[in-house]
Amino acid sequence: MEKIKLIDEKGKRIDGRGAKDLRPIKIKVHPLNRADGSCYIEWGTNKIIASVYGPKEAQPKHLQDPLRAIVRCNYDMASFSVDERKRPGPDRRSSEISKVIGEALENAVLTNLFPRTMIEVNIEVLEADAGTRCTGLTAAGIALADAGIPMRDIPAACAGGKVDGKIVVDLRKEEDQAGDADLPIAILPRTKEILLMQMDGDLSEKEFYELLDLLADACINISEMQKKALLDRYKQEEDVEEDKETKGKKTENKEIKKEEE
Amino acid sequence: MSKSVVSAIRKDYLYKLAQDGKRMDDRKFDEYRKITIEPGVITHAEGSARVRLGKTEVYAGVKLELGEPYADSPNSGVLITNSELLPLASPDFERGPPRENAIELSRVVDRGIRESGMIDFEKLCIEPGEKVWKVFVDLYVLDHNGNLFDACALAGLAALCTAKIPFERFGLGKDVPLPLATSPPISCTHVKFNGALMADPSLDEELIADARLTIALDEKSHFRAIQKGEAGSFTLDEVKEITKMAQSNVEKIRNIFKKAVKR
């Protein structure tokens, strides 16, 4: 089979992006009603929804920590999220991803405030197009903030890699499959601490640090989008509250008038 | 496993409202919540739909695979319906293999599709006894706020009605729409508590319900599937009253459904 050209002469990628450009990202805060916090994110063709429940009683009990809360993450892919149907339910890949995302989030949460409890984070991939663990973690960070869980900062994540010998940020599926390396990271934007890092493929030391720098910048950008989405959501909420208040006053006034009559 | 509990005071309140002919969200007893059907939301799926019924939200995805037919029906394609009560959707749902509730839900939706004859299974056969299309309908519940039966049934039907056979992905030629024979039956779920009968139960109403009844009616208003649930019972008159409610609601829902899937 002929190898597809992933980067053209002008340095543009198959979807017209430059090396540092992210795919378009759309974030909706609190799309779910039952969960304490939730977030829906569209990142390129990735569609992911994350929810947070808790802090609640830690189950099973032996997981309880008398000094702090534990963070449990369930990462799951819908059967129809990929071309070939995926068998529903947890598998080895999703278990590993759940573990590393849970650990990354636990680092951001001020767990010592809620001893003996559990914070449950659920990530559901509805449609997958490379970079789902980073997209999921980014959404989970927002869902945690939406649930009012105290954190040191909202974690943000992004993956990058090497395609046609060039370092690029935010791989899409074709690039991920044909590329030479894949490096997902999650950072705490305020301190730039790395919370999650995995890699496979082949990168020289120089390439590795170059990519890491680019990814850190990308995460800072993503962090701004996260904050904006959260602020927008609570701005809306304020508007709604105001409406209710003014409406309430109006009906009150009417009632007073009636009484006067 | 923890289970959501409706506080005694709220239960009393709902009972009292029902006595006065009211419901907590101001609906009439036979009134449905707002239904939104969006087909084609997942591009990787052969067919998909997102359905919102009030605050309840469900995604359905259809995937097709090649496989062997069952020995007793060598000329027919295979339908597999599966529902996932995601831990996202409710504090009561846990990860892991499907439990009773999820199995009942998938089987009721499965029957609604299978027995309606809407899928022409014979046309899904490629080589008799050897190779047929297996149709997977996967229902993913994202937000559980009552009446998953109707939401899942609608989502599954909408996903099927917009599905295509992925000949291209298997290198067998061009994609074609899934062969569908008839217009599908629409199901309506009702609950009974304290003697009152209500269509489209909200979560609280579902949790305090004594009994539940789902009826699926086709275009000729014939019964195509029924499922009774929970420990309570219905009298014959109650079943008749529910049938009346269902007949009027099915018409309205079918219109919304047809508009959404344009088929």
Image: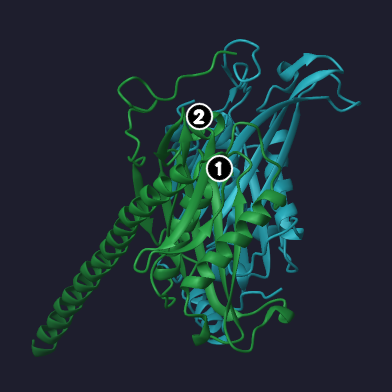
**Separation of disc 2 and disc 1 at Cα?**
31 Å
* Residue hosting label 1: B155
In the displayed structure, A108 sits above or below A252; it is above
In the rendered structure, find residue A174 and report the number of the disc placed on it: 2
From the image, state whether disc 2 or disc 1 is nearer to you: 2
In the displayed structure, A200 sits above or below B66; it is below
Q: Position of residue A15 (x, y in %)?
A: 37, 28
> Is disc 2 in the same subunit as disc 1?
no
Is there a contact, CB below 8 Å, between mark 2 and mark 1?
Answer: no
Q: Going by the image, does A146 lie left or right of B213? A: left
Q: Going by the image, does B161 lie left or right of B24? A: right
| Chain assignment, label 1 | B
Residue visible at 44% across and 63% down in the picture: A141
Res A231 → quadrant = bottom left
Q: Considering depth in this image, is B77 or B6 the residue closer to the camera?
A: B77
* Element class at badge 2: helix
Res A257 → quadrant = bottom left
| Chain assignment, label 2 | A
Q: In the rendering, what colour is chain A?
A: green
Give the residue type at disc 1.
Answer: Ala
In the displayed structure, A110 sits above or below B166; it is below
Q: In the rendering, what colour is chain B?
A: cyan
